[in-house]
Every structure is written in structure tokens, then in C-alpha cells.
Image (cartoon, coloured by chain):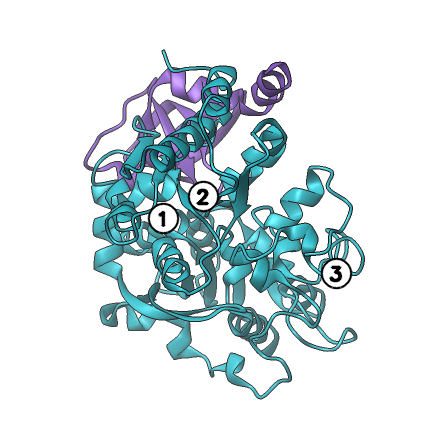
Amino acid sequence: MSATARQWLERIRALPLPDRVRIMNVCGGHERSISMAGLRGTLPPQVELIPGPGCPVCVCPEEDVYHAMQIALQDPEVIVVSFGDMLRVPVNLPLKETRSLEQAKAAGGDVRPVASPTEAVEIARANPGRRVVFFAAGFETTTAPVAAMLAGDPPENLLVLLAGRRTWPAVAMLLESEDRSFDALIAPGHVATVMGPEEWDFVVEQHRLPAAVAGFHPESLLAATYSVLRQLVEGKCFLDNCYPEVARPGGNATARRFLDETMDVIDAGWRGIGTIPASGYGLREHLAARDARRHFPDYGAHDRKRAGLMPKGCDCARVVLGKIYPNQCRIYGSACTPRTPVGPCMVSDEGACRIWWSNGIRTREVA
Amino acid sequence: MCLGIPMQVVAVDGFMARCEAKGVERDVSLFMMQDEPVAVGEYVMVHVGYAIQKMTEQEARSAWEIYDEMLGDVAEA
């Protein structure tokens, strides 16, 4: 039997901790569990849990959202489908203009939310005379199902506007930066389930940082927290796996094979952050006929003001990088709330700002 | 969209499965489980409509209880 949350907390409290330890997580699901369970309030004050780049909606290029909107607006015969969160992300246009996929729908575009790639396939089947563009943003857990969908030979009228991203290269970039903002890593449980926990070995081997893969239950997160703290205290780093039943060695071999067969690893842009080498997925050459980027003009490349940037005044980029906490953003809770989100971190259910707000943190702090 | 949901398989038809969690049923693709076939009664972790891995009943139950349990556990701690 694994220890209970209380037992993990007791073990953590018994450790001779240094004055300050910053543990980053890179998964919206982890951040949601941490916030909902109130784990921050139960840990010793030296231990900081920092939400990092764990929200694929937040880092999806603004140009790609604009591109998807224009595809829907320019040709009403095209159906644009995307995960629900993506529909509400505003692009950088004046307030009176059409600024999101949701608004593009209101303006006459055929835009539909989907919860799964299988729904995109169903919509394409039901509309054989129309092109269906699946705007697919997401990390490995979402991109692998998109790859599986492509490997399953979907209808020919289904195209993909792919904005898939790989998690570990963003963490590698943070670890290589001069002002590294964390001392240990809690690695994402479901990314490790698909890709294999070994992907995170580099944190330990190349950067000598404690790391542990965690599941989503507070017990698993506290076990991982205890593991990295103990590694730090004892000066012995290794990649621990606190989600071994699900995140197994080698990950899901079938899912990885589909990713390899359908997608190339490419350098990719992260909104507000810039290009990160080998951090994205692009459709392979043999799927060119399905690549929406090849079938429509590159609407995203227009010379709009602030194209690609975070909105004015919005600190989402620094939140995503774990440089500041969500409520240290200059517009958290004032200009930016879930009802009227400015930045993507307040839009998405996986955005750290949205999660913190939903869990009752309503006051802004000065960074 | 990135939230994993543990579900129990109630019927399998080729690469599609009818799965249930807390009284809600959904169609789930087993296309990514080809190296590890899934049978009726087993539990899978589901992401955006695709099973990504098998799990035990105990793991599934503890994940379902996540929201109720975590608050209680930590409040007591």
C-alpha cells in the first residue's frame, strides 16, 4: 500500500530542507490537482511549487489561431474544428474586430468544438462535399491521438492544421537559460505514459536536477515532491517514477509509432517565448494532401500589429516560463478574468491563471 | 482537453470501445492500444477520446475520487 497524503506530508516536514526550494511542474493537470487540493498551503514554507509550461493552449502561436480564424472566415464552405479551449483564445486585433474562433463562428464561419479527433473524423464523414480543417494544438498526450487518427486513414476531406508541441524541449530550454527559476522538476505523468519516463532522464543526467514523474492524485504529487526534496537533501539525483502503474518504461509503443509515421519533429514557435528547437510536430511529406498549411494562404503571416505576441500588458509569457506566479501578472483579476480573458492562461482550463482564479485566488501580488 | 479520465470498458467493437466512468458512457478509440489488447471489464486512461494505457481498478477508483478525496485528506493532514 502506498502512503497517504498525510504520511507523505509528515515525511516532507521531517526533511532538513534548505531555505528555499522551487519545484516546477509542467502540466496543467498537475497544477489543477495542486491548487484544488491546496497542497501549497500544507507544505513547509520553504517549498515553492511553480507552474511552468504546462498549457498547450497558452503557448499555441497567436498566428496559428489567426490562421484558423481566417480559414473559417474566408470560405464558409470550410468547417474548422478545434478543441473547445482554442475557440476562446483572443488574437491581437482591435476589440471591435473578430478576435477569436468563437467570434469567427458568430461572424458566419463554420467553427465547431470537438472533444476528440474521432469527432473531427465523424464531422468529415458527415460532410463529404466540404473540407474539414482540424486545428490541433496540444502536447504529446493530444498529438499522439491526432497521429493515431491520421494513421487510421480518415476521410480525404479532413485536413489538419497542426500545432502540436513536445514538452521536454521547453524544459530543456529553461534549464539551459542563465536565470533558471527552479531547483527540481515534477515531470508530467501522462506525457510520460505516452512517450516513456526516459524522456526526462536528461534533467538528471545533463543538469543534475532532482526529478520525479507524478500522477494526478495528491498522494502521487506529494510522493514526487518528497522524492525530489529528498534527492536534493541527500545530493543524489535520479529520475523517480511516482506513477509507475501507468507511466511505464518506453511509454505507449503504438502511440509513438503513429507519431513517427505521421509527423516530423520540427523547430516550433511558442507564443510569447519564441522558437524552441525540436519542440514541435509537423505533418510528414506523405501527408501533404492533408496539411492545411499547404492548402490555404498563410493568413497568419500578415503584418498585423503585435502579431504573434502576447496581448499588451499581459504577462502570460512570464507565467508560462515560471518566472512569476499567475497572480503576479499586471492585469490578473483586473483587466483579465475568466469572463473576459485577455491572455491565453486565463482562457484555458489548463492555464495557470484560470486554475488559480477558479481556486479562489482573487488578489494580485506584486512580483 | 488534456485531462485524463479513467474509464471501464463495457463493450469492444474492433478498435472502438464503449467505456463508462461514474455512470457516463462514451465511445473510446483503442487504436493506440494495439500492442496491448483491451478486454471488457478492464480499465483504461482516456485522453481526448483515445485510450493511452491500461490501469488497475484500484488506480481508476482512486483517480475518480480525486476531487472529493484530496480535499478531505489534506484538510486532515
The reply to whether callout 3 and callout 1 are in contact (CB within 8 Å) is no
Q: Quadrant of residue A163?
A: bottom left
Residue shown at 71% from the left, 58% from the top: A341
Q: Are marks 2 and 1 on the same chain?
A: no
The alpha-carbon separation of the residues under discs 3 and 1 comes to 35 Å
- The answer, for residue A163, to whether it is visible in the render is yes
Q: Tell me: residue A95, above or below residue A327.
A: below
Badge 1 is on which residue?
A145
Q: Name the amino acid type tagged 3.
A: Ile
Would you name the residue on which mark 2 appears? B48
Label 3 vs 1, first from the N-terminus: 1
| Residue type (three-letter) at the residue carrying disc 2 | Val
The picture places residue A49, in percent across and down from the top left corner, at: 53, 41
Identify the residue at horizontal 24%, vertical 44% (top origin): A198
The subunit letter for the residue under badge 1 reads A
Report, in whole angstroms, how far the alpha carbon at label 2 lies from the one at label 1: 7 Å
Label 3 vs label 2: CA separation? 32 Å
Specify few, some or many for label 3: CA neighbours under 10 Å numbering under 14, 14-19, or 20 or more. Answer: some
Q: Nearer the viewer, residue A30 or A238?
A: A238
A346 sits left or right of A59 in the view: right
In the image, residue A65 above or below residue A218:
below
Residue A108 position, x and y percent, is: 68, 69
Note the chain letter of the cyan one.
Answer: A
> Regarding mark 1 in the picture, which secondary structure is present there?
helix
Residue that extends furthest to the top in the rendered view of this protein: A1
Q: In purple, which chain?
A: B
Judge by depth and name the residue closer to the eye, A91 or A18: A18
Q: Secondary structure at mark 2?
A: loop
Which numbered dot is residue A331? 3
Please tell me whether mark 3 or mark 1 is closer to you in this view: 3
Pointers 2 and 1 in contact (C-beta within 8 Å): yes
- Asked if marks 3 and 2 touch (Cβ < 8 Å), the reply is no
